[in-house]
């Protein structure tokens, strides 16, 4: 009898707090309103499969020799990105150099000096608060017989950042600059151990406490085995780990603008792959910055010389890029910055 009473009161306590939690989440969801939908749509329309395809083909071409960190091919790829931002009229917070130099001594073994590439659009109201959109620019290099072009890994993410930057720039030229600064950050040294992002997190250009969120992109141009015949998807990892608000903003952006199937199976804390800890966003999460990692999953060409540009699904790459832009737009323009309500570090 007594035992049963204890069990009953535990049940009541449990259901009350669940109710409070449900109410809180409902309130939070209702507070997320995309006000400028027509405006956002105008700039979403500047993100096109044709331009994405052009960027992927260029960035994964043989000219860049598989973009191995510290090698001439990767330096050339960094210069390609810098020149793109200069041509688009998008400045760097580092002035004319655009490069965050990383000395050879920072890397292990036989890796040479390298660089992250950084560009940004200054916020009109809260320029010191930043939303960082990132992806790695390096890949596996080449052998005597083969080049690792890395079209999906990470030509796809790089192309997405280039298009998102152009969309924010077009908006700024129209007088619709974001309220917060939006930073475009291309990391080096990811394939050899998340080096570029770790270096950035130790030498941040904008303080980590002023970094509102990091949207990190690594491989978003292909379809994995699990989604053959059901391709309208993207895996999201990390979106709810530090900020419930970030998670629901992302869901709302998708519900309004892109209607992808948001697949969270790789976000499960029990997922054996543990991707949350395996790409550059984790160096932000560790510092308490909420992140979303956008990913298409692994496929047969993953880390093979056969990861080439003609195998990407460009309409899908366009849709996924638009989801990231719409999410970033909200994060950069909301009246108050998103709240960190979880401390799952
Ligand atoms: Zn990658």
Image (cartoon, grey):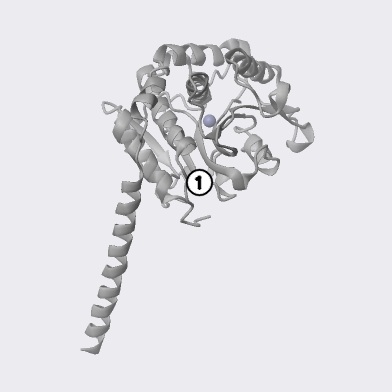
Front residue of this view, candidates 184 and 49 = 184
Q: Is residue 298 above or below residue 344?
A: above
Q: Residue furthest bottom?
A: 2
Q: Is residue 153 left or right of 50 when viewed as pictured?
A: right
Q: Is residue 145 left or right of 268 when viewed as pictured?
A: right
Residue 151 image offset from top left, x and y in percent? 50, 19
What residue is shown at x 64% (from left), y 18% (from top)? 82
What residue is shown at x 48% (from left), y 22% (from top)? 171
Q: Is residue 210 above or below residue 119?
A: below
Front residue of this view, candidates 30 and 209 = 30
Q: Is residue 144 left or right of 309 when viewed as pictured?
A: right
Task: Report the residue marked by disc 1.
Answer: 290
All told, the count of numbered labels is 1
Q: Is residue 19 left or right of 156 when viewed as pictured?
A: left
Q: Is residue 155 above or below residue 280?
A: above
Front residue of this view, candidates 284 and 233 = 284
Residue 191 image offset from top left, x and y in percent? 60, 32
- Name the image quarter holding residue 147: top right
- Residue 271 visible in the picture: no
Residue 109 image offset from top left, x and y in percent? 75, 34
The quarter of the picture where the N terminus appears is bottom left
What residue is shown at x 62% (from left), y 21% (from top)? 67
Bin the neighbour count of mark 1 within 10 Å (Cα to Cα): few under 14, some 14-19, many 20 and up: many
Residue 167 image offset from top left, x and y in percent? 47, 21
Q: Secondary structure at mark 1?
A: loop
Front residue of this view, candidates 126 and 268 = 126
Q: Is residue 336 above or below residue 145?
A: below
- Residue 103 visible in the picture: yes
**Mark 1 beta carbon near ligand 1 (under 8 Å):** no
């Amino acid at each position: 009898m007594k035992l049963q009473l204890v069990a009953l009161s535990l049940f009541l306590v449990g259901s009350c707090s669940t109710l409070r939690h449900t109410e809180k989440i409902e309130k939070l969801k209702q507070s997320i309103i995309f006000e400028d939908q027509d405006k956002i749509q105008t700039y979403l329309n500047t993100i096109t499969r044709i331009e994405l395809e052009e960027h992927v083909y260029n960035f994964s071409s043989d000219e860049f020799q598989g973009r191995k960190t510290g090698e001439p091919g990767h330096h050339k790829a960094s210069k390609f990105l810098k020149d793109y931002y200069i041509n688009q009229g998008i400045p760097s917070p580092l002035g004319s150099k655009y490069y965050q130099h990383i000395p050879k001594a920072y890397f292990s073994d036989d890796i040479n000096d390298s660089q992250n590439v950084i560009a940004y659009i200054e916020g009109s109201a809260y320029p010191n608060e930043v939303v960082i959109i990132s992806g790695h620019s390096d890949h596996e290099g080449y052998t005597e017989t083969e080049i690792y072009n890395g079209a999906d890994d990470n030509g796809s993410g790089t192309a997405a950042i280039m298009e998102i930057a152009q969309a924010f720039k077009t908006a700024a030229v129209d007088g619709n600059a974001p309220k917060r600064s939006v930073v475009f950050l291309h990391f080096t040294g990811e394939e050899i151990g998340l080096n570029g992002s770790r270096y950035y997190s130790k030498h941040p250009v904008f303080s980590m406490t002023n970094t509102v969120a990091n949207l990190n992109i690594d491989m978003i141009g292909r379809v994995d085995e699990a989604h053959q015949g059901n391709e309208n998807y993207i895996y999201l990892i990390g979106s709810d780990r530090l900020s419930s608000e970030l998670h629901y903003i992302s869901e709302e952006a998708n519900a309004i603008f892109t209607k992808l199937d948001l697949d969270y199976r790789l976000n499960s804390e029990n997922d054996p792959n543990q991707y949350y800890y395996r790409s550059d966003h984790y160096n932000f999460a560790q510092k308490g910055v909420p992140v979303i990692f956008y990913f298409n999953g692994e496929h047969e060409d993953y880390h093979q010389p056969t990861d080439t540009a003609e195998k990407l699904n460009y309409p899908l790459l366009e849709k996924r890029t638009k989801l990231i832009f719409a999410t970033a737009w909200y994060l950069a323009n909301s009246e108050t910055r998103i709240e960190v309500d979880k401390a799952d570090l």
